[in-house]
């Protein structure tokens, strides 16, 4: 395999509008997935360094976005108590984003922008498991009544695209929609921009990914033309890779999600095994990049909160970090949209609400595959240890309370320790 280190590019082209499955979905600010790990996993045991850096950076920051509903007080220094639910949203706005100031890009999305990436990070109560759920941007969902940051009420809707909720009522509206969809309480959230993805990929020194086949996409900025093999993705190229829809899987947003999971799992492995957490300079650069390009909720706008969430991830191994796509079905009313798969979603939502780890039985999705010659079975979370001696065994049909919940095979994803490769849309 060839190894290339890709830096920055400047050419851009406008992409046609497409959505849904197969040949669908506008390339969004996926990046959030990347940041979900950069803001959570990277803060992992950064302790003092990130705490000091974050404190310095936050002195010049604003008050943060206020969420309606339950709130969390800034914790003391140490791991966050109990479970943590944090939503990372990627805005596709081109406003004030370097390299996106031509008329076509600004016409595509300006101002607040759309929430084209929506990633929920769930850290278990015992801090032993992490579930990262990606919600398709073109999923049609019910949107509850929202309140904008300025306090203006927004009427509910029985059916709307998920990626319209940010422009509809701000970050609080996105959070309310995800809470309504999953049944979880989500007290922490943040929005990241295109520039944020670029800055954070530069700060971490790039992420090495595997491509099973070439990936070409002339509609990203800059365009992608990657050969099969391994590539270290940095800066604008990393952003294009994460945003690419036409170049991966079947040209749809669902394929893009599994491609993003290839990147995120590689990022987790680098953070945990590549010395990132032992490099104060990289940590400080990450904190700087995050503060400059991320808009947090007021519940997250505190350095000790970030450190506490990071410390909660300290002992979570890659095998216990599960990436998955929220289960969907084709929308019978619109071939370019998807709707929640209520049967599979009920199982996933139940596992999240009851704070149970999950076990994947499905594939890695249409945008990813295992390396050639690999006979690894379908991804799954490790089973819990055996019960203490003298503990009565449960019937086989009744899993113990701490046992992973087995998700239907229709739910795609992978664990962070699985080294998967991206499939190009050839």
Image (cartoon, rainbow, N blue to C red):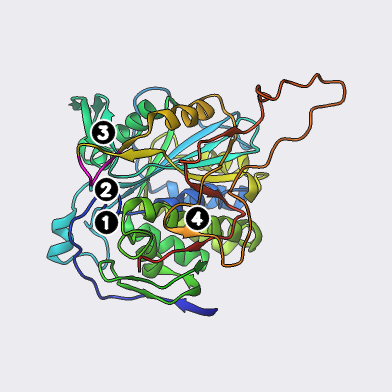
**Picture quadrant where residue 34 is located:** bottom left
Disc 2 residue crowd, few under 14, some 14–19, many 20+, Cα 10 Å: many
Taking depth in this image into account, of 198 and 397 the one nearest to the observer is 397
Q: Which residue is mark 1?
A: 23
Residue depth check, mark 1 versus mark 4: number of the one nearer the observer: 1
Q: Secondary structure at mark 1?
A: loop
Q: Is residue 324 rendered to the left or right of residue 29? A: right
Q: CA distance from mark 3 to mark 1?
A: 35 Å
Residue 196 x/y as whole percent: 38, 57
Q: Residues within 10 Å of mark 4 (few under 14, many from 20)?
A: many
Mark 2 and mark 3 in contact? Answer it, CB < 8 Å. Answer: no
Is 336 one of the magenta-colored residues?
Answer: yes
Query: Which mark is nearer the camera, 3 or 4?
Result: 4
Q: Which mark is residue 149?
A: 3
Mark 4 lies on a secondary structure that is: helix
Q: Where does the magenta region start and end? A: 334-338
Drawn side of residue 5 relative to residue 241, left or right: right
Say if 336 sits above or below 94 in the image.
Answer: above
> Could you tell me residue 423's position as x and y percent?
43, 64
Q: Is residue 65 visible?
A: yes
The residue that label 2 is drawn on is 20
- How far separated are the C-alphas under marks 2 and 3? 30 Å
Closer to the camera: disc 4 or disc 2?
2
Report the predominant secondary structure element of the magenta stretch.
Answer: loop
The first of marks 3 and 1 along the sequence is: 1
x and y percentages locating residue 94 in the rendered image: 23, 57
Residue under numbered circle 4 = 264
Secondary structure under tag 2 reads: loop
Cβ–Cβ under 8 Å for marks 1 and 2? yes
């Amino acid at each position: 395999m060839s190894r290339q280190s890709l830096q920055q590019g400047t050419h851009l082209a406008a992409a046609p509008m497409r959505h849904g499955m197969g040949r669908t979905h506008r390339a969004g600010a996926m990046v959030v997935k990347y940041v979900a790990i950069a803001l959570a996993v990277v803060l992992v045991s950064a302790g003092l360094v990130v705490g000091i850096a974050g404190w310095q950076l936050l002195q010049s920051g604003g008050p943060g976005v206020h969420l309606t509903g339950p709130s969390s007080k800034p914790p003391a220094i140490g791991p966050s108590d109990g479970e943590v639910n944090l939503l990372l949203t990627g805005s596709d706005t081109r406003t004030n984003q370097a390299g996106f100031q031509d008329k076509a890009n600004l016409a595509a999305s300006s101002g607040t922008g759309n929430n084209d990436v929506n990633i929920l990070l769930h850290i278990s109560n015992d801090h032993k498991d992490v579930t990262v759920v990606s919600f398709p941007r073109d999923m049609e969902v019910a949107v509850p009544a929202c309140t904008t940051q300025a306090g203006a009420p927004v009427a509910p809707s029985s059916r709307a695209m998920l990626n319209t909720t940010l422009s509809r009522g701000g970050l609080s509206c996105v959070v309310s929609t995800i809470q309504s969809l999953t049944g979880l309480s989500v007290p922490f959230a943040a929005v990241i921009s295109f520039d944020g993805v670029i800055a954070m990929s530069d700060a971490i020194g790039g992420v090495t990914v595997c491509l099973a086949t070439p990936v070409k996409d002339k509609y990203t900025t800059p365009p992608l033309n990657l050969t099969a093999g391994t590539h270290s993705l940095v800066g604008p190229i990393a952003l294009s890779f994460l945003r690419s829809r036409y170049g991966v899987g079947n040209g749809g947003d669902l394929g893009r999600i599994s491609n993003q999971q290839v990147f995120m799992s590689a990022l987790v492995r680098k953070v945990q095994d590549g010395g990132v957490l032992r490099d104060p300079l990289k940590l400080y650069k990450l904190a700087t990049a995050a503060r400059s390009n991320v808009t947090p909720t007021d519940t997250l706008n505190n350095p000790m909160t970030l450190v506490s969430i990071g410390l909660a991830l300290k002992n979570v191994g890659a095998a216990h970090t599960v990436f998955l796509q929220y289960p969907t079905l084709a929308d019978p009313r619109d071939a370019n949209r998807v709707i929640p798969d209520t049967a599979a979603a009920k199982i996933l939502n139940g596992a999240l609400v009851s704070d149970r780890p999950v076990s994947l039985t499905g594939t890695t999705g249409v945008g990813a595959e295992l390396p050639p010659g690999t006979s690894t079975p379908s991804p799954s979370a490790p089973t819990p240890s055996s019960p203490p001696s003298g503990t009565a065994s449960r019937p086989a049909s009744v899993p113990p309370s701490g046992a992973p919940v087995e998700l239907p095979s229709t739910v795609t994803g992978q664990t962070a320790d699985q080294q998967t490769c991206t499939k190009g849309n050839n």
